Image (spheres, rainbow, N blue to C red):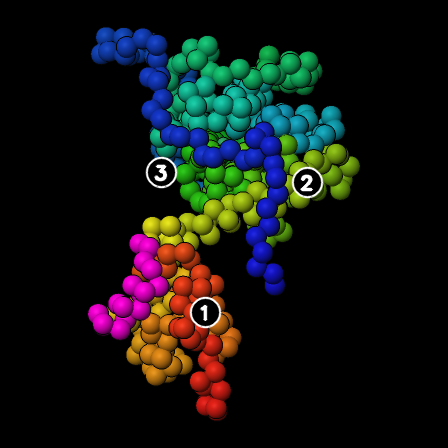
Amino acid sequence: MSTTTVTYTLTESEMRKPPTPRGPLPPLFDEKVTLKNWYRFVNWPQTILLISTPFIALYGMMTTDLQTKTLIWSIIYYYATGMGITAGYHRYWSHRSYKASIPLQIVLALIGGGAIQGSIRWWSRGHRAHHRWTDTDKDPYSAHRGLIFSHFGWMIVDRPNSRLGYADIDDLKADKIVDLQHRYYPYIALFMSFAFPTLVCGLGWGDWRGGFFFSGVARLVTVHHATFCVNSLAHYLGEKTFDDRHTPRDHFITALVTFGEGYHNFHHEFPQDYRNAILFHQYDPTKWLIRICFVLGLASELKTFPSNEITKGQIYMKEQKLNEAKRRLKWGRPIQELPAITFDEFQEATKNQGEKWIMIEGIIYDVREFVQKHPGGEKYIKLGIGKDMTTAFNGAMYDHSNGARNLLSTMRVAVCRGGGEVESMKKNPEEPIYDGSAFEDKKEL
Ligand SMILES: [Zn+2]
Ligand SMILES: [Zn+2]
């Protein structure tokens, strides 16, 4: 394997940008919030929905028997409505990462509505702003405002639209299904979230109450907090596998609770890719669903980012990690910071001042601590003290291992003025250059 460093010339624009410095964001509101005016900064409909539903679910779960059929249906409907958001709202309408047939669009618009997270138009506008203005004040759920804010705090506050970053949604405004869903959203949301799952349990096996509390309300609360994790947990937990410019991260646990949206670092780097997880063993049921729809002819033109560019991102981040690991190691005193001494001073120090110094390529090394540990034997290293050991070290006596070379750099103490073996030979033509010939008859070498 070659150890040559591979470098390519890039323009300023082609070069990757370093992580964005994390500074304090401006206050949430233009006006000062006081005890007298705080209620004006609350988004009451969203607050009431987000606070009341967990209590209603808790009450229902404590007062209603859970039937097996209802439990199975609740889990199925949990996945259906969750993936209405991830495969529909997110990967189809917000990012257009594939083409969906009209029947698939209708199903996704309905079941996505059953997750009560706003209309496709409202959701996608916010999400496109999140991608365009990630981590800034213009990001509706900026991770720099904390875990709680990015999870659901941003929905409780009522910020003026002018504070959010602009995101183009002309394509969504021109979309018939999106427009219809937006216009009739309250009816669709209430029907798909509560009425429809209750009807299935009621008409199916007579469990009206369980249908409402378990597959309606409890399922809704679970879907809420599972998908909210895409904005919170996915910006806190895990690795920055492809890019470190912003907060998104990749983690299996986040993927597990978000129907596969947990490979969020990948997603922010390649948002138009229909996948979040690129490896076959990574958990991304949303990707699997889109693939199944593709096989069934319901989805087409699944977009993927070129793997050449994906790999570049991965390699860059691995290099960052390696550099970090390198920075933690001892590499010896930098050569440019070493004091310069003459060859005569080098010899004087070893002959009359008791220094245990050797010279290799013009650098003086202090081997005092190492003499007894020298794997090649104490006597051989001692013979090199006060001498230029360049050729001996590099093969004449023994071609030292890379481990030995790494260790050598940590023993630097000075540089021989004039530099290098050639210079020192010029200054001291009488001084024998140690080349290991004295050991040629020693069979153990
Ligand atoms: Zn994000
Ligand atoms: Zn996205």
Compare marks 1 and 3 and give the one earlier in the sequence. Answer: 3
Compare marks 3 and 2 and give the one earlier in the sequence. Answer: 3
* SS assignment at label 2: loop
Q: Pointer 3: what residue?
A: 62
Q: Quadrant of residue 195?
A: top right
Q: Is residue 15 left or right of residue 98?
A: left
Q: Which mark is residue 306?
A: 2
Q: Does 25 sit above or below residue 442?
A: above
Alpha-carbon neighbours of circle 2 within 10 Å: few (<14), some, or many (≥20)?
Answer: few
Mark closer to the observer (1, 3): 1
Q: Is residue 377 left or right of residue 75?
A: left
Task: Give the alpha-carbon distance from disc 1 to disc 3, as whole Å.
Answer: 82 Å
Q: Is residue 345 magenta?
A: yes
Residue 309, x across and y down, in percent: 64, 41
Q: Pointer 1: what residue?
A: 390
Task: Check disc 3 and give the amino acid type.
Answer: Met
* SS assignment at label 1: helix
Task: Give the alpha-carbon distance from disc 3 to disc 2, as whole Å.
Answer: 51 Å
The residue shown at (75%, 34%) is 300
Q: Is residue 172 left or right of residue 233?
A: right
Alpha-carbon neighbours of circle 3 within 10 Å: few (<14), some, or many (≥20)?
Answer: few
Task: Check disc 2 and give the amino acid type.
Answer: Pro
Q: Which residues are magenta?
A: 339-354
Q: Quadrant of residue 66?
A: top left
Task: Check disc 1 and give the amino acid type.
Answer: Thr
